[in-house]
Image (cartoon, rainbow, N blue to C red):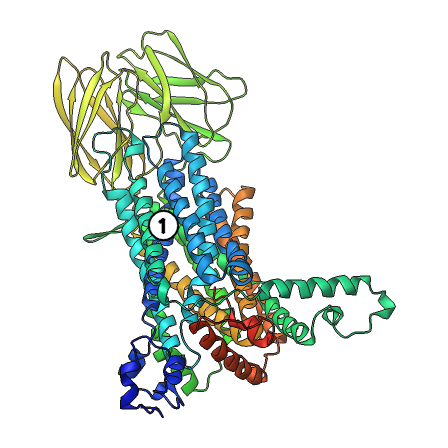
């Protein structure tokens, strides 16, 4: 117990949650030298328990955000029909906005509304965005354009919502503690960090299950009803509603500091003023040592701005780290689709693969704190923060080298598909004779011989895209036949040769999009003379295909791996069949009037998902060394009045990193995913070298230089805290600049 004295007469005047300042005012506590010396029971007695509402809100909000984001890429790709590049671009554009808007949220909170009002008002925008996004994912809405428009509006609102409250929630929680409660405040931020990771971990595991395994539309048919995105988005929306309810539930107990002006805005004004007056000063009259000395600002603001700019120079290479790091939810998720997600009795969905990052991060941070760092200190090995950050950059690059090597192995067993401005041709010959198919389009060479009851290898010769393409062949009776198709880039067009003599050609499009749920896909082509009905028996139930017309292909049906049975009724004959399905493979079953045969169109996934674990582990190591260390280092190097500015720019590096991804994927100049992975690895290795040079010339700030400012700030904080608790705030925000600027630090 510290130097705390209590009188029996005043014990009854205490209540749980009283701050130490209030307890001192009541005369119960005479002196408090160090909260660390107090017993746990006394610390809990004075603990502001209403912060648990804030912790609960953060858990629900992080569940809401990461749950929605975990299935976003597959939603864009599978439901809205975007190609891989466009889906990746939209995913990263959303992240850009989500990490740019915190700066705006911080300015609004610090200058106009205050943190409490900003949180609950912006949360309404957040919730509305979730609702709009969920409505846009309901397949019963008939218009595809409406789905896209609602989804994009919802994403913008969600990004503004999560970004708007991001700089406010943690710092608002810190405001609830008296300045003396250093231990309790540190415990709160540890609990807050735990809530963030718990929400992320649980949501990234659960939400993909809601997408893939819940049948929301039992009486509906069609590929748009195969996955339940409405539930996968609706549950995060509901969690955000719960988050707001929890936050408002503690309103009557919160300490609500008034807005005192945005230090970020004053920082920008100082820089703008410095540039303006330096530019207007003739070259011969520029006698001041630093261009900022020309700014129309007080000397302390100019000095603090100089310190921040020195730190920001170190931030220049950091966007490249985030460019790689945030591809865990885009390119690496797409890579996971090409892997076998079965690990004995466990099946990992592609959008669950991001769960590896929070699992590794909550394991590695405490592990390093009790093993690696103490060992390095014991052996006096200098592992400074800047060295850790540099290592983090190179580890991120190494993770993409590993990803590139894995992609090489994947593509070795993968069925090649047409690239940009290309298309392929698949021929299904159900005739009783060999058919030679030729191109009837000028300037296009195509000459394929297809045996009876067989197909061609469509991957041998991809054709340049054109609006119309005509094929010709001679049927079994010697008659000429033609078929014209209108190709779509990056697709495989199909020619179906029907009837025993091959006299009935028809055209269509071969499905190529794999199942993401650990099984395979089958579809049927009717080459007979009449309509047929098919029933497929799967472990999850039966799927019925009714009245499939001659010359038509059915929708592809997701099925479990291994043997699947099907039942055919053509009106005059009924018979059964079976097909052995491998993970990720796609099959076509051709049904004529008296027989069936099948072919595998897309190869299976033969590489285990376990091979993607190393790249996640390596990039998480990089995150521990760069992100955790970097934010702490830059925060320690900033003057007390500028810590929120440094944190704001730290978040902006995340936004800029995602812009780099947008530029590279938007350029669409790299056909190979392997080449793209290695390009990103090369870029961050270059960024790492630049960081080493910048770190070499960086002169660290002596943190003791700010001791007096920190003491003044603490005294000022105590006074303002007491006044706010007493509902009598009349402190002018700029009476003490050192305090005023740091009191409302927006811990982003």
Please tell me which residue is depicted at 34% across the width and 91% down the height of the picture.
Answer: 2
Please tell me which residue is depicted at 56% across the width and 61% down the height of the picture.
Answer: 111
Residue 77 drawn above or below residue 295: above
Residue 507 drawn above or below residue 338: above
Tell me, yes or no, if residue 82 can be seen here: no
Please tell me which residue is depicted at 76% across the width and 75% down the height of the picture.
Answer: 289
Where is residue 22 shown, x and y percent of the image?
38, 80
Q: Secondary structure at mark 1?
A: helix
Where is residue 136 shown, x and y percent of the image?
38, 37
Residue 15 drawn above or below residue 566: below
Q: What is the quadrant of residue 438 in the picture?
A: top left
Apparent side of residue 131 relative to residue 596 in the rendered image (left or right) = right
Tell me, yes or no, if residue 233 can be seen here: yes
Q: Nearer the viewer, residue 62 or 696?
A: 62
Q: Quadrant of the N terminus?
A: bottom left
Q: Residue furthest right?
A: 284
Q: Nearer the viewer, residue 101 or 724?
A: 724
Q: Nearer the viewer, residue 378 or 699?
A: 699
- Classed neighbour count for the residue bearing mark 1: other residues with Cα under 10 Å, few (<14), some (14–19), many (≥20): many
Please tell me which residue is depicted at 48% across the width and 60% down the height of the picture.
Answer: 397
Q: Which residue is mark 1?
A: 70
Where is residue 538 shown, x and y percent of the image?
17, 35
Q: What is the quadrant of residue 234 in the picture?
A: top left
Apparent side of residue 499 relative to residue 724 in the rendered image (left or right) = left
Residue 651 drawn above or below residue 673: below
Where is residue 732 shown, x and y percent of the image?
58, 71
Q: Nearer the viewer, residue 382 or 81?
A: 81
| Count of numbered circles in the view | 1
């Amino acid at each position: 117990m510290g130097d705390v004295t209590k009188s029996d007469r005043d014990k009854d005047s205490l209540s749980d949650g009283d701050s130490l300042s209030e307890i001192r005012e009541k005369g119960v506590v005479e002196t408090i030298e160090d909260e660390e010396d107090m017993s746990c029971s006394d610390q809990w007695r004075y603990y502001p328990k209403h912060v648990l509402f804030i912790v609960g809100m953060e858990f629900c909000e992080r569940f809401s955000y990461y749950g929605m984001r975990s299935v976003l890429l597959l939603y864009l790709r599978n439901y809205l029909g975007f190609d891989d590049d466009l889906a990746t671009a939209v995913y990263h554009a959303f992240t850009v906005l989500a990490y740019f808007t915190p700066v705006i949220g911080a300015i609004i909170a610090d200058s106009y509304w205050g943190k409490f009002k900003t949180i609950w008002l912006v949360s309404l925008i957040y919730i509305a965005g979730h609702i709009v996004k969920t409505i846009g994912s309901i397949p019963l809405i008939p218009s595809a354009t409406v789905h896209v428009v609602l989804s994009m509006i919802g994403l913008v609102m969600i990004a503004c919502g999560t970004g708007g409250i991001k700089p406010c929630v943690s710092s608002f929680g810190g405001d609830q503690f008296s300045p003396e409660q250093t231990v309790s405040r540190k415990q709160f931020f540890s609990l807050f960090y735990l809530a963030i990771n718990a929400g992320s971990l649980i949501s990234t595991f659960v939400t993909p299950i809601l997408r893939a395994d819940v049948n929301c539309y039992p009486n509906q048919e069609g590929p748009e009803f195969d996955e339940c995105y409405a539930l996968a988005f609706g549950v995060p929306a509901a969690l955000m509603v719960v988050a707001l309810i929890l936050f408002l539930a503690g309103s009557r107990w919160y300490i609500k500091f008034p807005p005192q002006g945005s230090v970020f805005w004053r920082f920008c004004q100082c820089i703008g003023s410095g540039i303006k007056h330096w530019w207007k000063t003739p070259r011969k009259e520029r006698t001041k040592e630093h261009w900022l000395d020309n700014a129309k600002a007080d000397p302390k603001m100019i000095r603090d701005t100089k310190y921040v700019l020195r730190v920001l120079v170190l931030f220049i290479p950091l966007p490249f780290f985030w460019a790689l790091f945030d591809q865990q939810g885009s390119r690496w998720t797409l890579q996971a689709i090409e892997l076998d997600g079965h690990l004995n009795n466990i099946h990992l969905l592609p959008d669950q693969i991001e769960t590896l990052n929070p699992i590794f991060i909550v394991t590695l941070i405490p592990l390093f704190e009790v093993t690696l760092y103490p060992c390095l200190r014991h052996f006096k090995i200098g592992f400074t923060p800047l060295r850790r950050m540099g290592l983090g950059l190179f580890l991120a690059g190494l993770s993409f080298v590993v990803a590139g090597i894995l992609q090489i192995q994947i593509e070795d067993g993968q069925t090649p598909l047409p690239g940009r401005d290309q298309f392929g041709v698949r021929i299904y010959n159900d005739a009783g004779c060999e058919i030679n198919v030729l191109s009837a389009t000028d300037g296009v060479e195509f000459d394929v011989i297809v045996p009876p009851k067989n197909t061609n290898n469509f991957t041998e010769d991809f054709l340049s895209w054109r609006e119309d393409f005509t094929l010709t062949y001679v049927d079994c009776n010697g008659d000429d036949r033609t078929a014209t198709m209108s190709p779509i880039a990056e697709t495989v067009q199909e020619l179906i040769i029907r009837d025993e003599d091959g006299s009935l050609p028809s055209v269509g499009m071969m499905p190529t999009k794999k199942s993401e749920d650990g099984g395979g896909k089958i579809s049927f082509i009717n080459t007979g003379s009449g309509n047929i009905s098919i029933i497929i028996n799967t472990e999850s139930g039966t799927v019925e295909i009714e009245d499939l017309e001659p010359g038509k292909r059915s929708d592809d049906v997701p099925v479990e791996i291994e043997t699947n049975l099907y039942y055919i009724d053509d009106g005059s004959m009924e018979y059964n069949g079976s097909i052995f399905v491998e993970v990720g493979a796609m099959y076509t079953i051709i049904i004529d009037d008296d027989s069936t045969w099948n072919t595998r169109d897309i190869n299976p996934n033969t590489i285990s998902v376990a091979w993607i674990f190393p790249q996640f582990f390596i990039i998480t190591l990089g995150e521990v060394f760069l992100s955790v260390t970097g934010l702490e280092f830059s925060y320690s190097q900033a003057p007390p009045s500028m810590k929120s500015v440094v944190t704001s720019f730290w978040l902006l590096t995340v936004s800029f990193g995602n812009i780099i991804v947008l530029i590279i994927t938007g350029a669409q100049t790299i056909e190979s995913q392997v080449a793209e992975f290695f390009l990103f690895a090369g870029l961050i290795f270059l960024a790492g070298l630049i960081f080493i040079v910048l770190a070499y010339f960086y002169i660290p700030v002596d943190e003791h230089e700010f001791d007096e400012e920190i003491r003044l700030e603490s005294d000022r904080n105590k006074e303002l805290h007491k006044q706010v608790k007493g509902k009598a705030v009349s402190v002018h925000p700029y009476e003490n600049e050192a305090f005023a600027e740091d009191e409302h630090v927006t811990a982003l």
